[in-house]
Amino acid sequence: MEEFKLTTRDEMEAETDKLLEIGRKVGADSWQQRVKNQTPHCRFGEEGICCRICQMGPCRITPKSPRGICGCDAAGIVGRNYLRFTAGGAATHSDHGRSICHTLYLAKEDGNYKVKDPEKLKRIAKEWDIETEGRDIYDVAHEVAETGLMEYGKPFGTQRFLKRAPKHTQEIWEKEEIAPRVIDREVSCSMHMTHMGCSSDPEALARQSLRAGLSDGWGGSMMGTEFSDVLFGTPMPVDTEANLGVMQEDMVNIIVHGHDPSLSEMIVEYAENPEMIALAKSYGAKGINVAGVCCTSNEVAMRHGIPMAGNFLSQENVVLTGACEAIVVDVQCIFPALGPLSKCFHTKFITTSEIARMPDSDFIHFDAENAGENAKKIVKMAIENFQNRKKDLVYIPKLKQKATVGYSYEAIVKTLDTVTNSHVDETGTTKPLNECVKSGIIRGAVAMVGCNNPKVRHDYAHVELMKKLIQNDIVLVVSGCAAQAAAKAGLMSKEAKNLCGDGLKRVCELCDMPPVLHMGSCVDISRMMVLVANLAKDSGWNIDELPVVGCAPEWMSEKAISIGNYVVATGLTTFLGVYPQTKGSEVFDGLLQGGIKDWVGACFHVVEDIDKLGDAMIEEIERKREHLHI
Ligand code: MSK
């Protein structure tokens, strides 16, 4: 048996260089080149002190001009920009969630989409006081979906899922007036507050940022996750592979990229259809290989073991292999660069959503009604494109690692609970995990999430931090592109237990699990919220007392800031490796990195030095343990 070894950043970069070399031969552009073209960035933009909110400006804050034309100071400008950034993220995640609600509403016994986890559906229905006894499961699904849709626009009240949080957390949200009302209201209220002539008070802007974030994490994202589980199945541990080596030279390679599993689920289904496989063979391929990029990849890896080709900054690499017949995208985190890049190769760049229209793509409108028919059409397009491959441009790096993924909240509870109990009911308990933490076998946990950002060496921060944390007996729950960074490096292999401290290694052995647990896509950070909520309830500690922190070392998107806001507002101190655009106001920055702790028991810390970032998280976890006397 080959000895287990992590794939290093140097190895991955050497392969990327080879791909870029091929790309240059055919005139391909790359993000690496565009970063050079865009550097240095505008300082006013970087510090958040450029105001473009009205047409009197743009105004920029300098020592000589400390106020914009309307009189707004740096704190107001930075705060407004930050709130708009948050609202963009909350809107994006939540609209994804809304689209899943619609898919659930259209689910039917003989339709494109069915209910795959009726038990979960019934649990949610019960939570929302929706009758299930004696009813057809699809009637229940439709009522749950419609009730979910009302969470976006009901005139009164707050988000239903807030009740999942411990009492203490709910009381904080009420007292601090940040309990989120309906999702669309929090987004539009954020836009209203930041319109010219409205809020410029930094505290009010920070408070609304937390509230808008909460409407995402405990509203839109949570529905996105829960209803995806109902429709496509709640993930359970499954083996897969990760990195560019999952692409196959003799197969039709279809890459799914984006976020909404409604599309990728259908592509996976049709790629396994015997009629499609026979068609692929008739074109000289051995079969059809579906692999993923970004969070769509997380979705299908968690539910079907579909291999993960890469994360956010790998998206161009899959095309550069010259072996990608089609890159099929839905929404979010898709580089418009994929259009012109695909034209340098034979790749079909297929956009499918009205939300993400891009030049140089083939647009095939995809919705719940035409899903089956159009998924078949897309798979067929990819197969027919196999013959157009330019053989001399094909280079698939041999990089590949084994990974075990699919650790939903339910899967984590089951995995840990079965070590101590022979029978686990459908909801289980986090008590065994609490026991491990109390005894110190596991010192604590880090929820590591988020993107890649060229400001940080690709995946370096994720992987180095994960290595350091597991050595210190800190378990990781990860999602989004952080998850794929771990999988590509090999940290989701069960053999990675050998890189852990003695305590965590023992837990991994007993539970037969890797030390870095894949919890899903970026909307699935709501799974982490459910986990900490139940850890708090089962332990009797408050969430802000748990030896658990959040971390986004390579974040870049508006969604990531929305996530940061709800993670902090839930009580988890969160460490960022990339500075948000808030440096321009000590007052607003000071609120985020300190002041808001008085409201919610947690705040952000920005530490750009990765080694120091790891130390800071370990210190915070140990400080919390000391506070709990454990
Ligand atoms: S895909 S939001 S780059 S995690 Fe969810 Fe990755 Fe960040 Fe997009």
Image: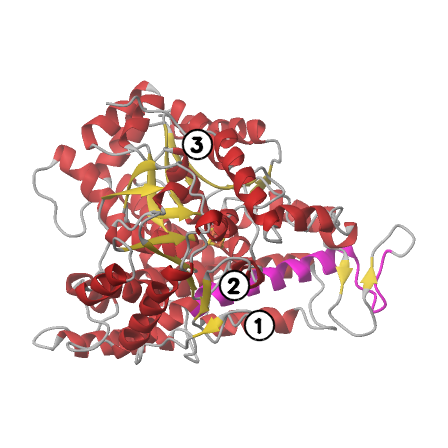
Q: Does the residue labelled 2 lie within 8 Å of ligand 1?
A: no
Residue at mark 3 to residue at mark 1: CA–CA distance:
38 Å
Q: Earlier in the sequence, mark 3 or mark 1?
A: 1
- Helix, strand or loop for the magenta stretch, by majority: helix
Residue closest to the eye, 595 or 109: 109
Is the residue 394 above or below the residue 381 in the image?
Answer: above
| Whether residue 476 can be seen here | yes
Q: Tell whether 270 sits left or right of 336.
A: left
Image quadrant where one finds the N terminus:
top left
Question: Which residue is at a point 36% across and 42% down the rendered structure image?
Answer: 242
The residue that label 1 is drawn on is 189
Residue neighbourhood size for the residue with mark 2, other residues' Cα within 10 Å, grouped as few (<14), some (14–19), many (≥20): many
Please report the bounds of the magenta region as a residue range.
Answer: 66-95
Q: What residue type is labelled 1?
A: Cys
Marks 2 and 1: CB-CB under 8 Å? yes
Residue 115's quadrant in the figure? bottom left
Is the residue 152 above or below the residue 243 in the image?
Answer: below
Q: What residue type is labelled 2?
A: Ala
Question: Which residue is at a point 56% across and 55% down the rendered structure image?
Answer: 557
Whole-percent x and y of residue 181?
46, 70
Residue neighbourhood size for the residue with mark 1, other residues' Cα within 10 Å, grouped as few (<14), some (14–19), many (≥20): some
Whole-percent x and y of residue 300?
30, 55
| Residue 189 magenta-highlighted | no
Q: Could you say whether the residue bearing mark 3 is in a helix, strand or loop? A: helix
Q: Tell whether 196 sits left or right of 545.
A: right
Residue at mark 2 to residue at mark 3: CA–CA distance:
30 Å
